[in-house]
Amino acid sequence: MTTADQPSGPTLVVGLANPGPDYEGTRHNIGWDVLQELASRALPMPASFSTHKKTNCEIAQTRLADTPVVLARPRSYMNLSGGPVAAVAKYFSVAPTDVIVIHDEIDIDFGQVRLKRGGGEGGHNGLRSVSSSLGTRDYIRVRAGVGRPPGRMAVADFVLKRFSKLEEPDVPFLIQDAADAVELLLKHGLDTAQNQVHSA
């Protein structure tokens, strides 16, 4: 990231998700969808993921926004994401402050993207696991809004469902906007990226 304290190593960009075909396309897996979009934008050619057994992640080492990055998806279930995230950060010598975590966010309207560093986890078990394993909450979150559960539907049931037929046409735009936000973070840092993303 372009900040006053330029990182000496790569920036780690993590997409939170549950593994396996049963979870593909669900709200909870939007982080992985954004990571796939970022991989397709990598230069000089699209990046491909491979299993990194030492960290229990699928990773791709590449460049985005002229910045070296490691794209990573934990191969564990969402609520155990922290162990693999901490392992890949340690393996590539990435400080927690240079970790970007992309995740679904029910407290943001569907289709909106918000950025922040630190703060609480808002009941998100994946974030709670990451904070615990990194030993800090001081990492950047790219929060992809998936909206609130309708009626009395349980949050867990809601995020494990696929997007509604009404929402489906706009999901690609949410993915693109979140990927754009990551590239802004890499190129300009958090403050500038927030100003651009939050004013959109």
Image (cartoon, rainbow, N blue to C red):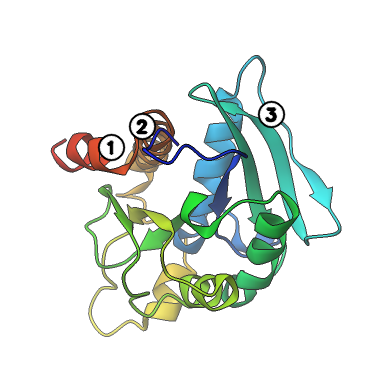
Which numbered dot is residue 139? none
Q: Secondary structure at mark 1?
A: helix
Q: Which residue in the structure is indicated by mark 2?
A: 184
Name the residue type under label 1.
Answer: Ala
Q: Which residue in the structure is indicated by mark 3?
A: 47
Q: Which residue in the structure is indicated by mark 1?
A: 193
* Residue lying at 13% horizontally and 38% vertically, measured from the top left: 199
- In the picture, measured across the screen, residue 143 lies left or right of residue 135, that is left
Q: Secondary structure at mark 3?
A: loop
Distance from disc 1 to disc 3, alpha carbons, whole Å, reads: 24 Å
- Residue 6 in percent (x, y) is at 47, 37
Name the residue type under label 2.
Answer: Leu
Q: Mark 2 or mark 1, which has the lower sequence index?
A: 2
- Residue 12 in percent (x, y) is at 58, 47
- Point out the frontmost of discs 1 and 3: 1
State whether residue 155 is above or below residue 104. Answer: below
Residue that lies at the very extreme toward the top in this rendered image: 44
- Residue 158 in percent (x, y) is at 40, 72
Q: Quadrant of the C terminus?
A: top left
Judge by depth and name the residue closer to the eye, 170 or 191: 191
Residue that lies at the very extreme toward the right in this rendered image: 53
CB of mark 1 within 8 Å of CB of mark 3? no
Q: In this figure, what is the number of numbered marks?
A: 3
Write down the quadrant of residue 192 in the picture. Answer: top left
State whether residue 180 is above or below residue 58. Answer: above
Q: Mark 2 or mark 3, which has the lower sequence index?
A: 3
- In the picture, measured across the screen, residue 2 lies left or right of residue 14, that is left
CB of mark 2 within 8 Å of CB of mark 1? yes
* Residue lying at 63% horizontally and 76% vertically, measured from the top left: 80
- In the picture, measured across the screen, residue 89 lies left or right of residue 195, that is right
Looking at the image, can residue 99 be seen?
no
